[in-house]
Image (cartoon, coloured by chain):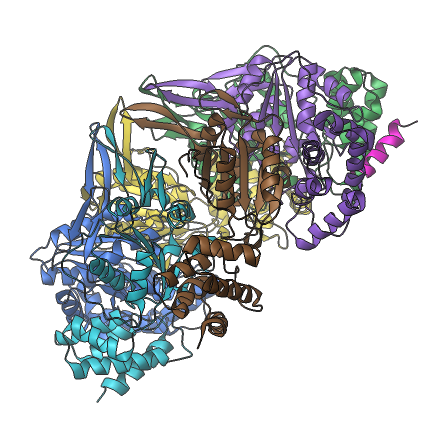
Chain colours: A yellow, B blue, C cyan, D brown, E purple, F green
Amino acid sequence: MNAPALPSTHIPFYQPVADECAVFEQAWRQQLPILIKGPTGCGKTRFVSHMAAVLGLPLFTVSCHDDLSAADLVGRHLIADGDTRWCDGPLTRAVRSGGICYLDEVVEARKDTTVVLHPLTDDRRILPIERTGEELQAPPGFMLVVSYNPGYQHVLKTLKPSTRQRFVALSFDFPAPAVELAVIQQESGLDAPRAQQLVTLAGQLRRLGGYDLDEAVSTRLLVYCGKLMMSGMSPLTACRVALVEPLSDDPDTLAALQQVVLTQFGA
Amino acid sequence: MNAPALPSTHIPFYQPVADECAVFEQAWRQQLPILIKGPTGCGKTRFVSHMAAVLGLPLFTVSCHDDLSAADLVGRHLIADGDTRWCDGPLTRAVRSGGICYLDEVVEARKDTTVVLHPLTDDRRILPIERTGEELQAPPGFMLVVSYNPGYQHVLKTLKPSTRQRFVALSFDFPAPAVELAVIQQESGLDAPRAQQLVTLAGQLRRLGGYDLDEAVSTRLLVYCGKLMMSGMSPLTACRVALVEPLSDDPDTLAALQQVVLTQFGA
Amino acid sequence: MNAPALPSTHIPFYQPVADECAVFEQAWRQQLPILIKGPTGCGKTRFVSHMAAVLGLPLFTVSCHDDLSAADLVGRHLIADGDTRWCDGPLTRAVRSGGICYLDEVVEARKDTTVVLHPLTDDRRILPIERTGEELQAPPGFMLVVSYNPGYQHVLKTLKPSTRQRFVALSFDFPAPAVELAVIQQESGLDAPRAQQLVTLAGQLRRLGGYDLDEAVSTRLLVYCGKLMMSGMSPLTACRVALVEPLSDDPDTLAALQQVVLTQFGA
Amino acid sequence: MNAPALPSTHIPFYQPVADECAVFEQAWRQQLPILIKGPTGCGKTRFVSHMAAVLGLPLFTVSCHDDLSAADLVGRHLIADGDTRWCDGPLTRAVRSGGICYLDEVVEARKDTTVVLHPLTDDRRILPIERTGEELQAPPGFMLVVSYNPGYQHVLKTLKPSTRQRFVALSFDFPAPAVELAVIQQESGLDAPRAQQLVTLAGQLRRLGGYDLDEAVSTRLLVYCGKLMMSGMSPLTACRVALVEPLSDDPDTLAALQQVVLTQFGA
Amino acid sequence: MNAPALPSTHIPFYQPVADECAVFEQAWRQQLPILIKGPTGCGKTRFVSHMAAVLGLPLFTVSCHDDLSAADLVGRHLIADGDTRWCDGPLTRAVRSGGICYLDEVVEARKDTTVVLHPLTDDRRILPIERTGEELQAPPGFMLVVSYNPGYQHVLKTLKPSTRQRFVALSFDFPAPAVELAVIQQESGLDAPRAQQLVTLAGQLRRLGGYDLDEAVSTRLLVYCGKLMMSGMSPLTACRVALVEPLSDDPDTLAALQQVVLTQFGA
Amino acid sequence: MNAPALPSTHIPFYQPVADECAVFEQAWRQQLPILIKGPTGCGKTRFVSHMAAVLGLPLFTVSCHDDLSAADLVGRHLIADGDTRWCDGPLTRAVRSGGICYLDEVVEARKDTTVVLHPLTDDRRILPIERTGEELQAPPGFMLVVSYNPGYQHVLKTLKPSTRQRFVALSFDFPAPAVELAVIQQESGLDAPRAQQLVTLAGQLRRLGGYDLDEAVSTRLLVYCGKLMMSGMSPLTACRVALVEPLSDDPDTLAALQQVVLTQFGA
């Protein structure tokens, strides 16, 4: 769970794809929570960091998982020096400070987390903290943002409609080629021609059908690949260890991916 | 879990649909518990808030979930400053104060909660608190209200008949068009023509058959959409992020929903 | 779990159906435990309260559930004021006081409860309390009564034969019309003609075949309906919220039930 | 779990069926553990009590269940008066005192109990108590007796061969008619003719095929029936509540059983 | 779990079957761990005791089970007299003393035990004790021995290849007739002719095909049978209670086994 | 879990197979985490130890398992001498010291470990320690390395794409014959001809198709076999206990493996 990231004058680089920045800002102004849907490594976390900096809000990020409970979000009593003191969780810290609480991969969290999300996501906008007897009224600046990946959900892990229908929702996808090109250059320092080669290769890899691929290659891995090439690694090796091997364990799939790489960087 | 909401002179807006206010009041006068059935976001929580204010009763709301146990409702011993003190749960607070305890989505709660609900929902109307040795006799003002959504139940999550047959029951559905029109205008500030467009659109979306929709669009989302339009967002974008994307992750379903939106707000 | 209900001079109203009062008393005199089988809301709990009062015995009632363990019945050490003290559970209190311990829906309890029920239900009639080193010999007045509903059992929840064959058993069913008429009048204050209409309606509803009904309408719900009619609610509305809606969520079933109501109270 | 039953000069009544008393005694003399197999209520517990008294050994009986762990058998540290003291479990008490430890329905216990049973059931005959650092060498008098019911086992609950093949085994069944007659007379005080009628009836009920009966009627229930008849209950009623209703919830099965009763006690 | 068995001048009787003693000793000299596979009661535990005594090493035996965790092997902090002190588990005691740690039926243990077995079973030979901050380097004398029964494994319980391939492995089976004859005479004191009859009978019982037998009769049970015959029990009875009843609950299987006994000891 | 292995001047022997050392070093210089895939006993752990020594970095190795949680990696409060003190876990120690944290068989760990791995494996490179309120920025030297075996995964145990696509990945396989020859000689001291025989045998065993083998024979077992031959064991016996018996329990498979051994070392 993330400690607060205080608003800074530095705004993390984010290359907008469509109207997502405007929708985010208007939802925030109307005090509505947002749900972001999209594949792995397409920039959801970066987008939220960017918007928090643009709006001048502290950001509290939580990577959700099977064992994440309401207490992990709200806080708990800790024992220190023989004494008990209350320790706010990241959601409570976001409410108190009027910032953004971002629950990444929210469908992974334990179901008892909805007990604290529901009163914060209707017109009440309250966070009851039973253990301390407090009931916090979220200030206007507070915003709840959640995300998940619709292309890779467990059968048993979905948002209940009673939770889903409390959010304004945005769909993310891989960025358009021109946007992805800018991202790779900015993040890895690679020159335009080789970055373009990676973008073209990414398109080819993502269109590759009929193989055992849980998910297509992410922009993050393209950046990894660019960094390794910048550090002197040959393109073929960089593509193998950053774009091919991370995607699958199936020999046929790996061979097909590597074949696509060869058509782009071979000979 | 909700801290007590003390009765106030302010009565939350609620647009009655049929005889539900009268039934609620008579059940309360006869000291009978109530079960409310209905879809997501149709106004169950608002209705209970409204009735609590009308009857001048404190309201204690609990969003039930997988891990909610009897102790969460009744209370537990907490350790503070090296000392142990008893802390009433929301159900106990409702009984002591003669108010309403509202268990939202009660079928989600752990089964041991029935041990405290049963003696409160027959002619005994008692709440035994084993840990403190107390046995509270509910005052005449106390009322237990539970709700769940019959259209979205897990196979393993239902109320046992021995629990169900302890409640007077009310079915809620989406409000009639005239009622929903009034709600949207009141909550979002939208003018009548555009609010009417949203109501018409809602009817079309709810009648859309043959798609992968867990639940139809709620009045809450219509209010969200109205708010975003009031803040200057184009109707098409507002409908996409507030009425379409929150309903499904399936591309065909999303396309079909967006198509309906276009017939109402396009060109 | 119930705190002890001390014997009082007041004997709760119970309308006998057959020889159940005599069987109960003779089993008690022979120091044999009793198992009561029967549907929801047919009066099992009231019957046990009645017999406890008739025999002048304190009564300890426990609503069993998934998490009910042997320690919940026998007792446990509690920490209070930095000190540990033993706290008897309801079964131990019943044994010490020579009263009745009534385990309602016993099949729901955790399996480790049988460890304390077995030595109390054979000729030993002892309750060993391992944690305190005590072994209580049940006095002649002590009686164990358990109940469950054979019509609504989970596949995995039954009494093992080694437990079942330790009890004398009684089957309960809905009371005969004349008995049910008396109960409704007594409990709701309704006049005889309208109470008779409810009894007739109950018979019609219970004979309704071919629908998705977990269990037939209980006498308790008829009493609820009578109370609502006494408070001025129209018979049609009272039947809808007290007899129809609590029984099912299936629209066809609800329509069929409501149709039966109309033939009795319509026009 | 049973506190120790000290050897007494009183020997509980037990009617031997075959050579089981001799086998038990010789196994005890050879320091071999015994496994008793047999149906519910056929006298296994009584047999062990009888043999313990005959051999002048203290007896420690444990009814096994799903949650019974090794610590429940061996002992644990308890906190009392702010202090921790070790408290022997029934198995440890049996080893220390050179008595019999009887684990009833041993297949129900948690699997970690085998960790303490194995070194006690091979030639080592030791009980290591890890928590206290002790290792007890069982004295010659100590004997481990376990039982279960092969006719009513869960699929997942059996003794592993590595455990089973550590025991000498005895099969029990319902006693022969003459033996059962003696038992009923001795236990209930019923006269010979009526006791004989019950024995004849038991044989008829046990031969009844083709019905939903988990297990045949036990000798214990015949004794119950005799006691109720002795207290003045009519034979038909006594048979219904003691021999028919405890065996099944299925209406057809109950009717068939009652029909057999009528042929014996009717008219 | 076993307290340490200090090396003694007494060497437990073990009748070697093949080269198992030499393999064990060479594996120990090369500091390689050993895996012993074989059926119930064929002498695995005795073999390990024998080798520990021959090599002059202390032996720590642990019967593994479902709930056995890494902490049970390594140790834990215990609270005593208001103070916390570390208490070594049997594996740690074996490492510290340079002895043998024998995990019997290792596949039954919880998976987190592998975390402590892995670094002890490769060239590192270390035992990290996280809770105390220690990291023990196993002395040359330390040896890890594990065993399981390949003929009676649960589907879900096997050793992972990454664990298996860390051991030198030995397969045990029932001893050859001459060896088994010597074992029975030595352990039970039976004379040669009757011991020979038991060995012949064992061979016949083990060859019996087509019946519901989880596992064949063990040498241990033959020794039991010999002891009971030595104490004066008739061979037919001794075979019934020691060789037939412990093997099965199925009446047909029991009858077939008893028939084989009759051909050897009948008439 | 491993205590820190401080960098030493001694570099563990590792025979490179391809460009894995260069890829590892460049990933480390670019501050990218690495995922190593490969079969049991092929040298993954040795490779990581080697690289840590070459780069002069402390190494923290964790063997993952079912019960390994985020707290096991990050640290926890321990109570000692009545006082509570924080104790860093191996991941935290690796971050603080700028070393390598190696999670062996990472797919076995509990899912809540991803919560601490995610922020360390994107451009943030932070480790939030919620319990102490710290947020560590990983120094440039820190590297996360994880491994698993794609050929032996449980159905339910895979890395989620959102985790996988955060790593540069390397595939390991059994070493080429010349490399394996060098490893066996170095580790066991065996002479070249016999080591060559083992390498040839390994190839034959690994090509053996159609048998019940979870995984092929590892280089580790070849080293075991060489050590036993060095200590004087006959090649046939050494191969049986080190190469055949550890691979399978199936008699047909064992016979087929032994047959291959005979063709190499027989006669």
B138 to B185, vertically: above or below: above
Q: Is residue C259 visible?
A: yes
Please identify the dominant SS of the magenta region. helix
A148 to F228, vertically: above or below: below
Q: Is residue F100 visible?
A: no
C92 or A159: nearer the viewer: C92
A179 to C44, vertically: above or below: above
In the picture, residue E122 is in which quadrant? top right
Image coords of residue A215 (percent x, y): 54, 48
Image coords of residue B34 (percent x, y): 22, 64
Instruction: Tell me which segment is drawn in magenta.
Output: F254-267
B211 to F135, vertically: above or below: below
Residue at point 52% right, 47% down?
Answer: D44
A11 or F252: nearer the viewer: F252
| Left or right, F67 with reference to E249 | left
Q: Residue furthest right?
A: F267
D266 or C4: nearer the viewer: D266
